[in-house]
Amino acid sequence: MFDIDLWREIIQSINKNRTRSLLSGFTVAFAILLFTILFGLANGLNNTFSEAFVDDASNAVFIRSGRTTKAHKGLQAGRRIQFKNQDFDYVKTNFEPNIEFITARIYRNAAASYKNEKNNYSIRAVHPDHQYLEKTKITQGRYINQRDMDVRTKAIVIGDLVRQDLFLKENPLGKYINLSGIPYQVVGVFKDDGGDDEERFIYMPLTTAQTIYGNNDYIDQINLTYNPSLNYDEAIDFGLKLEKQLKERFTVAKNDQRAIRVFNMAMQNKGINQMTSVLGILILIIGMGTLIAGIVGISNIMIFIVKERTKEIGIRKALGAPPKSIISIILIESILITTLAGYVGLLIGVGLLNWVGPSLKTYFITDPSVSQSLVIAATLTLITAGAIAGYLPARKASNIKPIVALRDE
């Protein structure tokens, strides 16, 4: 295999028949190029879906209230549905086996100030579990905890951009921010993969907000994550059952879509998963078809090469060359051309994806790329393809009788 004379002969053969070698290589390079681009685009589409929900748990369920649009059981349309603490407790208690984390939300806006710095921010009053629904990353201090809820502490967790706006380079932990005239102590700073908008929020204990903003038990929204052990269909059934029971609890018509809205990520994830699976299968079929076409192409060319070198093979056999040496020459040449050409196609494909990648965001394709495992698999496929393409004609050549080969014209 590492006989220098053998490799010199193979290189001379390739150099002597440049046009044939280029055509062989082009067939494989184009197949791998197309294969790489297709898989890169598929990965880009998957990245778009993942990025769209990067700051929310993938198994989240959001329960929102509104106004009724239909009269039901003697109650007129236009009635406002208002969630309260007991509704939160109802969901948490009655659906406990199917719930992983659960939190309520209250939304407020406030003018914030610290020393000479001022700005307006959105406030979210939440339960401690909220950290896991939003994938909040604490970079300093801590998050809201149960003691904050029980004692109704004036403790807040601020986004990193709030920290930059108000504290500049000063450490905010333990400092007090004035929110619309009321001082709150900063106990934590967070970052969020959702970007700048998410890092401009301020979190506080839900019970504190209820006491200060209205002295009531109202909540604006209930969010939860379903048990990760549930499959998509089970999670969707859980969401439908939850919506049905809440509508019954508030005397809302079943077909009233505005009064109580349950957005279940399981439904969206199932649809995305089905679509990407079908897309992946189609791309795999197209890619493999293209690859097979490349293998067939180089195999046909190798058959032509064998026919072209029939007399040469006859001379080799007449001089005592064993069949193994005949097979080695043709097989290694096939593998070498296929591997080099395929690698060039792979590099061009990756280069094209990197070049046009930023402009594809307009078409909902984010960071199209191929994984390292795909590159390794493609390399192994190339070597295997080259071996398959060269072996059959090489074996046929090794079985030619010297007298027949020498008579060949």
Image: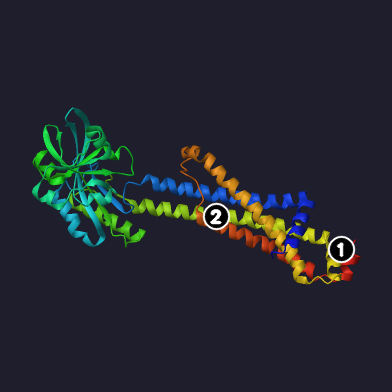
Residue 6 visible (yes or no): yes
Separation (CA) of disc 2 from disc 1? 40 Å
* Residue at image coords 25%, 40%: 159
Type of amino acid at the residue the image marks with label 2: Val
Q: Is residue 140 left or right of residue 298?
A: left
Residue 43 picture location, percent across and down:
48, 49
Residue 187 lies, with reference to residue 99, above or below; the image says above
Residue 23 picture location, percent across and down:
73, 50
Type of amino acid at the residue the image marks with label 1: Lys
Residue 405 occupies quadrant: bottom right
Q: Residues within 10 Å of mark 1 (few under 14, many from 20)?
A: some
Check if mark 2's residue and mark 1's residue have beta carbons within 8 Å: no
Q: Residue furthest front?
A: 4
* Residue at image coords 38%, 44%: 52
* Relative depth, front residue between 383 and 271: 383
Q: Is residue 69 left or right of residue 292?
A: left
Residue 85 picture location, percent across and down:
14, 49
* Relative depth, front residue between 327 and 236: 327
Q: Quadrant of the C terminus?
A: bottom right
- Mark closer to the chain start, 2 or 1: 1
Q: Residues within 10 Å of mark 2 (few under 14, many from 20)?
A: some
Residue 246 picture location, percent across and down:
21, 52
Q: Which mark is residue 117?
A: none
Q: Quadrant of the N terminus?
A: bottom right
* Relative depth, front residue between 211 and 277: 211
* Residue at image coords 32%, 58%: 235
- Looking at the rendered structure, the secondary structure element under dot 1 is helix
- Looking at the rendered structure, the secondary structure element under dot 2 is helix
Q: Is residue 151 left or right of residue 73?
A: left
Q: Which mark is residue 375?
A: 2
Residue 75 visible (yes or no): no
Q: Which mark is residue 311?
A: 1
